[in-house]
Amino acid sequence: AIEKYVKSGGSILMISDHYNADRNFNRFDSSEVMNGYRRGAFDNPTKGMSPEESASEKMKGVESRDFLNEVFGLRFRYNALGNVKVDDIASSEESFNITNGIKAVSMHAGSTIAITDPNKAKGIAFVPQLSKHDKWNNAVDEGIYNGGGKNEGPYIAISKVEKGKGAFIGDSSMVEDKTPKYKREDNGENKKTYDGFKEEDNKKMVMQIVEWLNKQENQKDFKAMDINLDDKTPLKRFEQPENSQEVEQEPWGTPKRGYKWYDASTYASGSYGAKGTKQNKTEHSTEEDNNTTNNDTGTFDIPSSVSRQEKFNITVHVDESKLINQKFQLSIKNKDGIEVGMFNGQAPGISESVNPKIKNGKTDWYFKTKIANEADEEVKVEVLSGGNVIAQTTLTVE
């Protein structure tokens, strides 16, 4: 689908990360997903998986392909660099003005890109010369493959493919902020991100990449354009897909008991794609005369309906015995699990964890919130404690 889209005139921006950035324990790192194959598993994508994993719907029809190389003339390398100031920037003339005014961008544990077909792909930002001390602390191999510089391959590259084009960045830090929307799938803990978008000239670079991606050009590749072509990136033998080897046994960590990356019903509440949790789900009834909703584990003082982006309060009362660590959070989400509650002016997501007042064994806490524009006409309101749903109701959105 991506190949057809780009060749017919579409543009794509792919943002990868360092090798072994496998966040959900499915053995596919971000770079492997985009390249089209698992390192050391080119002939068998399910290598090392249990029979249950291999037969899951998530793996149905999954086949290896040297995708980025075949279509865009490049690959994300499986290296892992640490904190690097990237200041070897191509000139405006050699980057279609993408790099105009750019002095440096930043990397915090990322990868570089191999140029495999200079007719299609070109680097526009390169890391400096590096030593072994510049590799990421958790790199599973040498981390730095060619000593840095242009031989390490570009940190940011662009590609021209028939009617369309692509851009590629080797680290998510460059485009992220510190307000992750979702929880971790395996344990429901907060994700930790940083304000990388504000560092160096990161913001300007990303914006100018997007501006270039939005320009239509007739030339089918860089060879047909007035621009100097790159050299191919010198590769290690193990970087050929059929020669690649798994360096350490995957997955890199041990998931929480009961979590299965291929079964959304096991995902922690608040994570992307979560289907909810089986614990403590209860039916509710509404007393419309006072807008109080009761179930057998809790009570909500809540409007009968609200409008999107309208400020309102929800007061929650649940039994003290249901709390874990005497704390709970509030979640408002669509039926597909997407969070739509906006608490205390923040982006959609689960509320901060609170330590409520307790009187006669009952909590008493209210939340200030709004409902995001992407909300369904009916949303779930859930009280979470220790990742479990301890009370829930629904709310009509007008």
Image: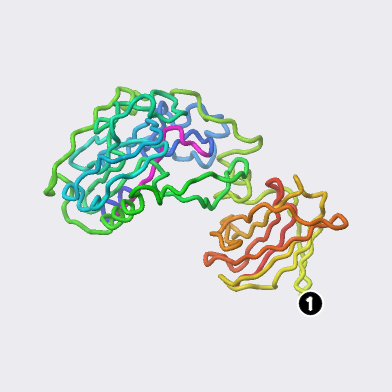
The foreground one among 22 and 180 is 180
Outermost residue toward the right in this view? 360
For the C terminus, the image quarter is bottom right
- Relative to 361, does residue 223 appear above or below in the rendering? above
Q: Determine which residue is flagged by label 1.
A: 289
Residue appearing at x 44%, y 28% in the figure: 139
Q: Secondary structure at mark 1?
A: loop
Check residue 318 for magenta coloring: no
Residue appearing at x 38%, y 40% in the figure: 107
Residue 228, how many percent across, how many down?
13, 42
Residue appearing at x 65%, y 65% in the figure: 368
Which quadrant of the structure image shows residue 255? top right
Could you tell me if residue 5 is visible in this image?
no
The foreground one among 305 and 54 is 305
Which quadrant of the structure image shows residue 211? bottom left
Within-10-Å neighbours for mark 1: few <14, some 14–19, many 20+: few
The rendered magenta stretch, by its main secondary structure, is classed as loop
Residue 27, how many percent across, how many down?
49, 33
Q: Which residues are magenta?
A: 11-23
